Image (tube, rainbow, N blue to C red):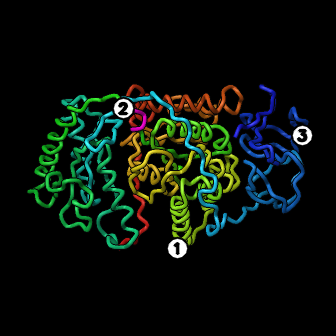
Amino acid sequence: MTPSVSSMVEGPRYIRVHPGDNVAIVVNAGGLPEGTVFPSGLRLHQRVPQGHKVALTDISEGEPVIRYGQIIGYATRPLAAGSWVDVTAVRMPEPPALDDLPLATAVPEPPPPLEGYTFEGYRGSDGRVGTRNLLGIVTSVQCVTGVLEHAVQRIRQELLPKYPNVDDVVALTHAYGCGVAIDAPDAAIPIRTIANLASHPNFGGEILGVGLGCEKLLPDRVTPDAGRNVTSLQDHRGFSAMIDEILRMAEERLARLDQRRRVTCPASGLVVGLQCGGSDAFSGVTANPAVGYAADLLVRAGATVLFSEVTEVRDAVHLLTPRAANEEVGRKLIAEMKWYDAYLRRGGADRSANPSPGNKRGGLVNVVEKSLGSVAKSGTTAIVDVLGPGERATKHGLIFAATPASDFVCGTLQLAAGMNVHVFTTGRGTPYGLAMAPVVKVSTRTALAEQWPDLIDVDAGTIATGERTIEEVGWEIFRFILDVASGKKRTWAERWGIQNDLCLFNPAPLT
Ligand code: CA
């Protein structure tokens, strides 16, 4: 997909993504006033904000509105060429039916291998590679959070300075563990999420577990080698004894973690999670295609690439099932869509709950348009596997990891899948960061990169202005990922210490 940018460099510009599109988005910062004439001769009938759509031809009521070469909806009223196609002008189509989708009918050929790309990582005993050296402390219940936060503060102040090779201490705190229907079928999701977080390669197999003693979620379900690694607060005589024991166990592990050294690892050790948040109409023409190009480079280099966010894939799933490596993978993908349809139905919601008001202000009219832009992140290679929420990735190549689109829930589940670098595209802007793995933020618009020069790591907005190509920005993202994975570069979120809380996905009942 190569967007054609209207040719004038300083004058009014729009981007039509696909030759069959009957709408395009306005590029100019601040939007364009009524009466603006584009180089193509198209004249605006009214003001159109930046990133919002303009009708390129007359569209009659009920006729399809086409973007990315796909129907994003139907005109609710006649739209003359040059009209603003806003959220009220487009009726959302039905989602693709899930029962007769083509499976593995257009499996992309394996792309040519990309040899010789490496990064400096911490190799674990199970072969997985860490990108940071962290002391992880997993919890089996929310009751311990306050005590643990006190302990973590003291670990940072008193212990970490003695172990300079350790980057930080991370408490895996959450609201799960008790007061929950622990045997409900969907409880498997939060439980395996916590367990897989605890065995994340950035913790180097030196996890410490803190429990209470009477919780439903037994610490040994989420902590490897629990007999050696867990302390329960009810076993201690008073608060000070609890803190002393956590500090003692932390120091043992810090001493061992401090011995870890980075070694040269092939790029195949990377597990890169892709996500978007605060999307706008540029997401699908600048940042997401550039990230998609980087995803292809990563797959060619043997890495694992995760894309996610079920509600942003659901309306484009008919474009993905043909790319499944085989029918079984295609069926797994459909099963995750069906599970999520039922989950939304159970909650009395549907897919129109996405996009957000900010997405709409950014020019997106509905989730169909958002989805078509979102799946551009997945690049062009075959989908080799599908993970349920919280499952760990075991294959190399492009994987769909089913998650909600909520930024923090998706990030948490991608961490559980083993993500060691996160790439996050944003149009409206979010300061998002995670404690467990570095987050590379890519802006869809140059205006955002200029507004937030100390939060945005890569500006993909230059693709819209024609200054750089998708390929150029894709290579920049790929190289930046390798440097960040190696610890040679730190992301802005890391430099400021921005760490959003983990957010578990618990679709099972509370009790
Ligand atoms: Ca998201």
Disc 1 designates what residue? 346
SS for callout 1: helix
Q: Residue at x 39, y 56 (%)?
A: 391
- Tell me where residue 250 appears, x and y as whole percent: 18, 43
- Tell me where residue 62 appears, x and y as whole percent: 84, 62
Q: Nearer the viewer, mark 3 or mark 2?
A: 2
Callout 1, which amino acid? Arg
Residue 7: say if magenta.
no
In the rendered view, tell whether residue 32 sits above or below residue 144: above
Disc 2 designates what residue? 265
Callout 3, which amino acid? Arg
**Disc nearer the start of the sequence (1/3):** 3
Q: Is residue 429 visible?
A: no
Disc 3 designates what residue? 43
**Disc nearer the start of the sequence (1/2):** 2
In the rendered view, tell whether residue 265 sits above or below residue 317: above
CB under 8 Å between discs 1 and 2: no
SS for callout 2: strand
Q: Which residues are magenta?
A: 265-269
Quadrant containing the C terminus is bottom left
Residue 267: say if magenta.
yes
Residue 51, by quadrant, is top right
**Is label 1 within 8 A of ligand 1 (CB to nearest ligand atom)?**
no
In this rendering, the count of numbered labels is 3
**Disc nearer the start of the sequence (3/2):** 3
Callout 2, which amino acid? Cys
In space, the residues marked 3 and 2 are separated at their CA atoms by 55 Å
User: In the rendered view, does 307 fall on the left or right side of 495?
Assistant: right
